[in-house]
Image (cartoon, helix red, strand yellow):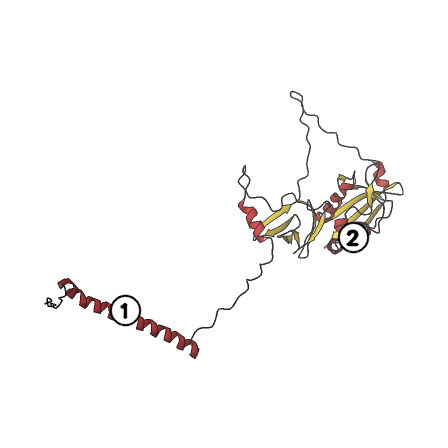
């Protein structure tokens, strides 16, 4: 039996055309593998020779800055009243009662605590609100770089209007009282340094210590040794302060008038009752 002869196989034309491209892909793959090996070798060599940069160190966060109140003050200035559109005043609610002017001035301020507080220059009345200057008629504060002034409140004057069609009645001048000439007068000098010493001692915060209301109107000195101004003004236990300059003293809260006149005037007249008899104390305020 004869078998047919095996004819040589022939490669298709398309397969023969693809063969060179396969060789190129193989060469490219070999080149890529060689490049990766070189890269890994270079990195290993750099670690061995110490060329790699130092490892990152752990850094703790900085502690937060202390609160100076500047941030709260700046935030408060951003918010304004819906009606006025003006920022809230840093001295809102505060009242200037008395001052001792000068480089080391002291201001007696109400509205911060339940009782008036004596604040020296350079100290804070509220967080971030610092007293920078005390003048004869005002106290200057600074908060977050913004200055504000606190002045004395105006003295209210009540005027009753006359009814329509009726001419106003002229006030009758009071007749001089002859008994005033018989009132003993005592004159003395008080320096502003003494007043400043009392204020800087912090005792002005105890403005009502050693004092009490007098049933007949006035302020009674119950303990001169504990009252700051009583020592300076030479007041005694049992003295009743009735008038300072042109203002009557009717209740304990009127002690602020005494602080006001002694801080603003060059001469102060204090009318008192001592041992049941009126007496006039004249003070000249020295520099």
> Can see residue 203?
yes
Residue at the top extreme?
165
Which quadrant of the figure contains the C terminus?
bottom right
| Residue 118 located left or right of residue 270 | left
Who's the residue at 82% across and 45% down the image? 211
User: What residue did someone put label 2 on?
Assistant: 189
Q: Mark 1 against mark 2, which lies toward the viewer?
A: 1
Q: Which mark is residue 29?
A: 1
Q: Quadrant of residue 80?
A: top right
Who's the residue at 25% across and 69% down the image? 26
Q: Quadrant of residue 123?
A: bottom right
> Can see residue 146?
no
Q: Residues within 10 Å of mark 2 (few under 14, many from 20)?
A: few
Front residue of 97/27: it is 27
Which quadrant of the figure contains the N terminus?
bottom left
| Residue 98 located left or right of residue 146 | right
Residue at the bottom extreme?
49
Q: Quadrant of residue 216?
A: top right
Q: Which mark is residue 105?
A: none
| Residue 149 located left or right of residue 233 | left
First in sequence: mark 1 vs mark 2: 1
Circle 1 sits in a helix, a strand or a loop, which is it? helix
């Amino acid at each position: 039996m004869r078998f047919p002869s095996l004819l040589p196989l022939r490669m298709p034309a398309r397969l023969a055309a693809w063969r060179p491209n396969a060789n190129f892909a193989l060469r490219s793959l070999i080149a890529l593998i060689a490049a990766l090996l070189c890269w890994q070798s270079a990195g290993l060599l750099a670690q061995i020779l110490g060329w790699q940069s130092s490892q990152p160190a752990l850094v703790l966060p900085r502690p937060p800055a202390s609160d100076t109140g500047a941030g709260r003050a700046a935030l408060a200035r951003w918010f304004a009243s819906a009606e006025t559109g003006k920022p809230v005043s840093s001295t809102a609610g505060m009242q200037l009662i008395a001052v001792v002017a000068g480089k080391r001035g002291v201001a007696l301020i109400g509205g911060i605590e339940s009782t008036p507080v004596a604040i020296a220059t350079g100290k804070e009345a509220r967080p971030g609100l610092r007293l920078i200057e005390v003048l004869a008629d005002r106290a200057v504060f600074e908060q977050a770089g913004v200055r504000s002034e606190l002045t004395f409140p105006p003295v209210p004057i009540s005027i009753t209007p006359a009814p329509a069609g009726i001419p106003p009645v002229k006030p009758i001048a009071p007749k001089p009282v002859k008994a005033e000439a018989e009132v003993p007068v005592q004159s003395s000098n008080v320096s502003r340094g003494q007043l400043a010493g009392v204020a800087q001692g912090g005792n002005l915060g105890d403005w009502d210590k050693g004092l009490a209301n007098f049933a007949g109107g006035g302020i009674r000195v119950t303990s001169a040794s504990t009252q700051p101004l009583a020592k300076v003004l030479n007041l005694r236990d049992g003295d009743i302060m009735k008038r300072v300059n042109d203002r009557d003293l009717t209740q304990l809260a009127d002690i602020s008038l005494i602080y006001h006149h002694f801080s603003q005037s060059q001469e102060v007249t204090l009318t008192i009752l001592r041992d049941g008899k009126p007496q006039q104390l004249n003070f000249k305020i020295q520099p």
